[in-house]
Image (cartoon, rainbow, N blue to C red):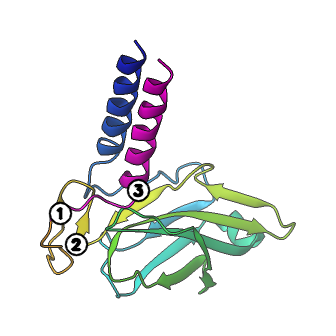
Amino acid sequence: MHKLIAIAIVMILAFNVAASEQGGFNEETSVEGTDIISIDYPHQASAGKSFGINVKLTEEAQNNTTTVNWITQICINSGICYPPETNSLENSGEGIWNGTIIPGDDVTYVNWRIDLIDSNENTTRVPENGFGWKVWSDCWYDGSEWGGNDSSCQDDNDDNVPGFITPLTLAAIGTAGLMTRRD
């Protein structure tokens, strides 16, 4: 019985990791009902090239907001996501805040959210939880296939296991081994 449970756990973990994401589809959160009127950004990231956004605030937010932070997270083709980074946007006037980042050479996608900080140091996050936007690069690997309109980042060896899958696989095998030894 324990062997059957161990096999089921390994299969569930493998399926969840493999099916966790479909590559190449950008995500965008609605700004309706927030202090943000619009966010303009490129719909594709490129390795080593400037990636910028412009955030337009409502008139009320323009009067109350002292800082707009762009919290970005860059994920790379090996399956690793770097820790989120806070980027302060510059107020260019008329309620428009802008900023840029430069993704590294093996960027898969860029995640982000916006934090609005008012004069009382209160922070409003858009979205409230997680990252609301994801923009894929022009050359990406999603764990099972390559994509994008540039092939310069593609590895000739497609037998690679992305970095985040290897530890999960080893943990699952270790758990299965411990469960079978209990018999």
Determine the CA span between mark 1 and mark 2.
7 Å
Closer to the eye: label 3 or 1: 3
Pointer 1 local density, CA inside 10 Å: few below 14, some 14–19, many at least 20: many
User: Which amino acid is tagged 1?
Assistant: Trp
Pointer 3 local density, CA inside 10 Å: few below 14, some 14–19, many at least 20: some
State which region is magenta: 158-183
Query: Where residue 170 sits in the image (x, y, percent)?
Result: 41, 47
Mark 2 vs 3, N-terminal side: 2
Quarter of the picture containing the N terminus is top left
* Residue 171 belongs to the span the image colors magenta: yes
Which residue in the structure is indicated by mark 2? 139
Judging depth in this view, the residue of 78 and 174 nearest the camera is 174
User: Which amino acid is tagged 3?
Assistant: Phe
User: Which amino acid is tagged 2?
Assistant: Cys
Query: Where residue 27 sits in the image (x, y, percent)?
Result: 37, 54
Taking the spot 35% from the left edge, 87% from the top edge, the residue there is: 48
Mark 3 vs 1, N-terminal side: 1
Contact (CB < 8 A) between labels 2 and 3?
no
Give residue 66's quadrant in the image. bottom right
Pointer 2 local density, CA inside 10 Å: few below 14, some 14–19, many at least 20: many
Contact (CB < 8 A) between labels 1 and 2?
yes
Q: Which mark is residue 146?
A: 1
